[in-house]
Image (tube, helix red, strand yellow):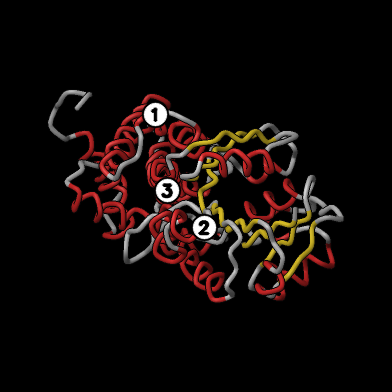
Amino acid sequence: MKIAVLGAGAWGTALAMQISQKHRVTLWARNAGHISGMRKARSNPLYLGDFSFNDQLMLEDNLREAIHDAELILSVVPTSGFRAILKEIRSLNHKAPVIWANKGLEAGTAKLPHEVAMEELGDPKKTGQHWGALSGPSFAAELVRSLPTALTLAATDEAFTQSLASIIHGNNLRVYTSQDVIGVSIGGALKNVIAIAAGISDGMGFGNNARAALITRGLAEITRFGMSLGGQKDTFMGLTGAGDLILTCTGDYSRNREVGLRLAKGQTIDEVLKGLGHVAEGVFTAKEVVNRAKALHVSMPIMHEVNQVLSFSKSPKEAVIDLLGREQKSEIH
């Protein structure tokens, strides 16, 4: 197959390198200088070091050329650019299936990727153009080292999901399938906010007990939010829920956990973002998920306190005190 991967950050590049072991892949980025540098190096030194591209991986900065004749489009652009890239695909009248691997809520609208796709590409049942989400516990730096990784591919059409999963599945990458696009999208988006909380906890030296509590109660918040929007409870216990949450809250490659660690050291959020060098989706997701949770009447105290730190300059110490000072209640709602 010919597959176009849009977005040449760490994860987009890692997926392109993985898939190019079996298929012809064109990796696209809007920045012509970035593409030129990768062509010369046959690697992505900016984001992934010197891991070499194979001969089936081509590079392109022209979107029309990148998706020309592509039988599948895999979008790995940041959530902030997701709607724009879908608009461009639609304007080019390209009808190949679109799968996304970005995780977050759109700034200003608080919409999840599947909601943006429905607005920009339409209902697959009516248009015939399938779309879905690829998500799960995964660090680019491990995938490019051929370390075992498991992901979930979700789309509403079961036959399409199964056929597409078999295309991506192989070697060190195991791909499971799901029809719960809503649950998969929500798990991937909200875990980043909890990872910031876990980073703050670790950075303040609160230990393993506190981190385990944050992960567990964070999963409860994600599940409540997800089910209120139609996600399936079992999805949040799987790879794209608990699995991705655990990895992002504990792994040393986690950008969102790193945000929390730096905040705990006293850096401002502007200083953190300036020094990070990569997109940390949780920073932008926190505000949107808190606003949407209010509209849904869903209790999300951890998300609320993270947003207070990020958006209202509340000190991490005060946020922790307020979380611990909440009224006693039953664990299970």
Which residue is drawn at the image coordinates 49% and 64% (left, top)? 82
Q: Report if the CB atoms under discs 1 and 2 are less than 8 Å apart.
A: no
Which residue is disc 3 drawn over? 189
Which residue is drawn at the image coordinates 41% and 28% (left, top)? 237
Secondary structure at numbered mark 3? helix
Few, some or many residues within 10 Å of mark 3 (<14, 14–19, 20+): many
Residue 99, labelled with which disc? Answer: none
Give residue 114's position: percent from left, percent from top: 42, 54
Query: How many tags in the picture?
Result: 3
Secondary structure at numbered mark 2? loop
Which residue is drawn at the image coordinates 42% and 33% (left, top)? 235
Upstream in sequence: badge 1 or badge 2: 2
Upstream in sequence: badge 1 or badge 3: 3
Give residue 297's position: percent from left, percent from top: 17, 46
Give residue 207's position: percent from left, percent from top: 41, 28
Q: Quadrant of residue 191?
A: top left
Q: Amino acid at mark 3?
A: Ala
Q: Amino acid at mark 2?
A: Gly
Disc 1 versus disc 3: nearer the observer: 1
Relative vertical location of residue 298 with respect to residue 279 in this rendering, above or below: above
For the view shown, which residue lies furthest in the right direction? 55
As rendered, which of 103 and 248 lies closer to the eye?
103
Relative vertical location of residue 7 with respect to residue 49 in this rendering, above or below: below
Disc 1 versus disc 2: nearer the observer: 2
Which residue is disc 1 drawn over? 234
Q: Amino acid at mark 1?
A: Asp
Few, some or many residues within 10 Å of mark 1 (<14, 14–19, 20+): few
Please indicate, yes or no, whether residue 102 appears anywhere in the rendered image.
yes
Relative vertical location of residue 244 with respect to residue 189 in this rendering, above or below: above
